[in-house]
Image (cartoon, rainbow, N blue to C red):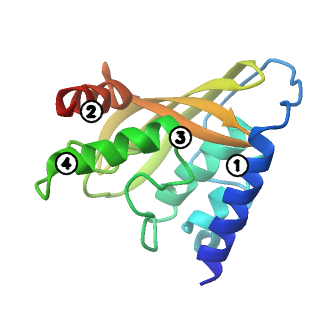
Amino acid sequence: MRVRMSLIVLAACGTVAACSPADEAQPTVTATATAGADTASAADVQSRDAIYAVQSEGPDAFVRAIYARYTAGGPTGEPPAPGQDPLFSRTMNALIAADVRAANGEVPTLNYDPFCGCQDQGDFVVTALAVAQADPNAADANVSFTNAGQAKEMRLKLVREGPNWKVEDIVDGDRSLHDALMAVAEAAG
């Protein structure tokens, strides 16, 4: 119930903020290696609420909160319905919803956790995380990690919608989630 109310409040704030001009921000580049989040206990960082709480703080805090869930043992709680995830941009949510509709009860294209590129999480260690923001409303994050001993790199393309940062795309190697889901949506008509 508390999560539902938080989501309703966030949606209302996002709607109002989307109509407001964005604050000007100086370009920043952050590059660090980390094995986990520095700011919250393991129980706190595993919930989606921990991510929602920092979405407006900046792209670096947002990405760190996403991956802190994995280094603390993995995401907990039920994810939002497909196409209604506050972590994703409006465009990405629309594509995720289209993917589920196109699957028509079968397995959709996005049938895994896109943040780790996996269905199962093992021992998870973030080895490097760098965020580059050259525009007040866009940033790229490069995240290197090992999951169950397998090294992986992801690039998250981020956009600011209203006051909050959102994931617009996740690129795993040379595979863009946005492009894969767009192809599904276009094929479905």
What residue is disc 4 on?
A: 108
Earlier-in-chain disc, 3 versus 4: 3
For the N terminus, which image quadrant?
Answer: bottom right
Marks 4 and 1 close (CB-CB < 8 Å): no
Quadrant hosting residue 62: top right
Q: Residue at x 45, y 64 (%)?
A: 80
Earlier-in-chain disc, 1 versus 3: 1
Q: Amino acid at mark 2?
A: Ala
What residue is disc 1 on?
A: 55
**Disc number for residue 90:** 3
Q: Which residue is nearer to you in this view: 9 or 127?
A: 9
- Callout 4 crowding tier (Cα within 10 Å): few <14, some 14–19, many ≥20: some
For the C terminus, which image quadrant?
Answer: top left
For the residues carrying marks 3 and 4, which lies nearer the camera in this image?
Answer: 3
Residue 131: x and y, percent? Answer: 65, 27
**Disc number for residue 185:** 2
Residue 111: x and y, percent? Answer: 23, 50
Q: Which residue is nearer to you in this view: 101 or 89?
A: 101
Quadrant hosting residue 154: top left
Q: Residue at x 66, y 67 (%)?
A: 8
Q: Residue at x 56, y 68 (%)?
A: 47
Earlier-in-chain disc, 3 versus 2: 3
Query: Which type of secondary structure does the marked residue at label 2 adopt?
Result: helix
Earlier-in-chain disc, 4 versus 1: 1
- Callout 2 crowding tier (Cα within 10 Å): few <14, some 14–19, many ≥20: some
For the residues carrying marks 1 and 3, which lies nearer the camera in this image?
Answer: 3
Q: CA distance from mark 3 to mark 2?
A: 15 Å
